């Protein structure tokens, strides 16, 4: 057993997860669970071990760790809350969408693109997964400065979402607002920031609303 600082193992676990080195990620998260004496990120670590096994195609092992994630730890951090909320939703976890998300968040953009190219209609059997696929493509395009494509994918995400209580559409509006604001299109940006605020219920409402309000306030101050 490692005698290092437990948090190092957690961050290494995340780094390997984003990189697609899932077995190494599992090993680091297990070391974190074994060495950390508190409760923070324990639920999340079990959840992410489950995700690693899901992405490795080992569904039985994935299920066992998802069960542990439901039972262990507390919802003290945003990561722990997300793990609990995701498992409680009963949604089927889509391995390809998680891969695209992690590669994009980790800055492994070519791997994200390669995964996107493997997605077929059968990989997206329901509306939520179809909306998320547009959202993930938008995030990748935005992060790689392909702004016309990003705006198009964000718009497709918003259009398909309708009034569903998912965070994809409100954040798509927020991000579109940022792009338009940077392009000097303040009035168009304002429309999107206000639209982001108009969504009544979603899991990141407090955070997205705060960012939209801040952007609107900055726009007003510049006038």
Image: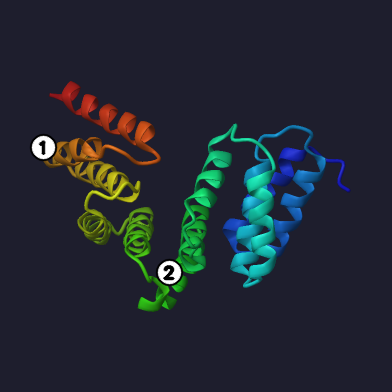
Taking the spot 54% from the left edge, 39% from the top edge, the residue there is 81
**Callout 1 crowding tier (Cα within 10 Å): few <14, some 14–19, many ≥20:** few
Residue occupied by mark 1: 187
Q: Is residue 137 something one can see in this rendering? A: yes
Name the one closer to the observer, 15 or 192.
192
User: In which quadrant will I find the C terminus?
Assistant: top left
Residue 212 lies left or right of residue 77; in this view the side is left
Q: Quadrant of residue 131?
A: bottom left
Q: Position of residue 173 (x, y in %)?
A: 24, 45
Residue occupied by mark 2: 113
Residue 188 lies left or right of residue 41; in this view the side is left
What separation in Å lies between label 1 and label 2 (alpha carbons)?
Answer: 33 Å
Image coloring type: rainbow
**Callout 2 crowding tier (Cα within 10 Å): few <14, some 14–19, many ≥20:** some
Taking the spot 76% from the left edge, 51% from the top edge, the residue there is 30
Taking the spot 18% from the left edge, 35% from the top edge, the residue there is 194
Q: Mark 1 vs mark 2: which is more N-terminal? A: 2
141 to 39, vertically: above or below:
below
Mark 2, secondary structure of its residue: helix
Q: Position of residue 70 (x, y in %)?
A: 63, 47
């Amino acid at each position: 057993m490692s005698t290092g600082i437990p948090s190092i193992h957690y961050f290494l676990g995340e780094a390997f997860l984003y990189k697609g080195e899932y077995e190494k990620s599992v090993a680091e998260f297990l070391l974190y669970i074994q060495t950390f004496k508190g409760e923070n990120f324990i639920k999340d670590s079990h959840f992410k071990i489950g995700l690693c096994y899901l992405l490795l195609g080992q569904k039985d092992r994935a299920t066992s760790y998802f069960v542990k994630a439901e039972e262990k730890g507390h919802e003290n951090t945003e990561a722990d809350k997300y793990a609990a909320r995701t498992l409680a939703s009963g949604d089927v976890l889509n391995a390809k969408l998680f891969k695209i998300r992690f590669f994009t968040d980790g800055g492994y953009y070519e791997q994200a693109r390669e995964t996107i190219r493997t997605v077929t209609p059968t990989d997206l059997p329901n509306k939520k997964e179809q909306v998320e696929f547009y959202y993930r493509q938008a995030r990748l395009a935005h992060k790689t400065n392909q702004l016309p494509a990003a705006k198009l994918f964000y718009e497709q995400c918003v259009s398909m979402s309708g009034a569903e209580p998912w965070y994809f559409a409100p954040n798509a509006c927020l991000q579109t607002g940022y792009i338009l604001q940077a392009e000097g299109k303040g009035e168009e940006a304002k429309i999107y920031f206000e639209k982001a605020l108009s969504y009544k219920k979603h899991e990141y409402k407090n955070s997205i609303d705060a960012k939209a309000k801040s952007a609107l306030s900055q726009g007003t101050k510049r006038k």
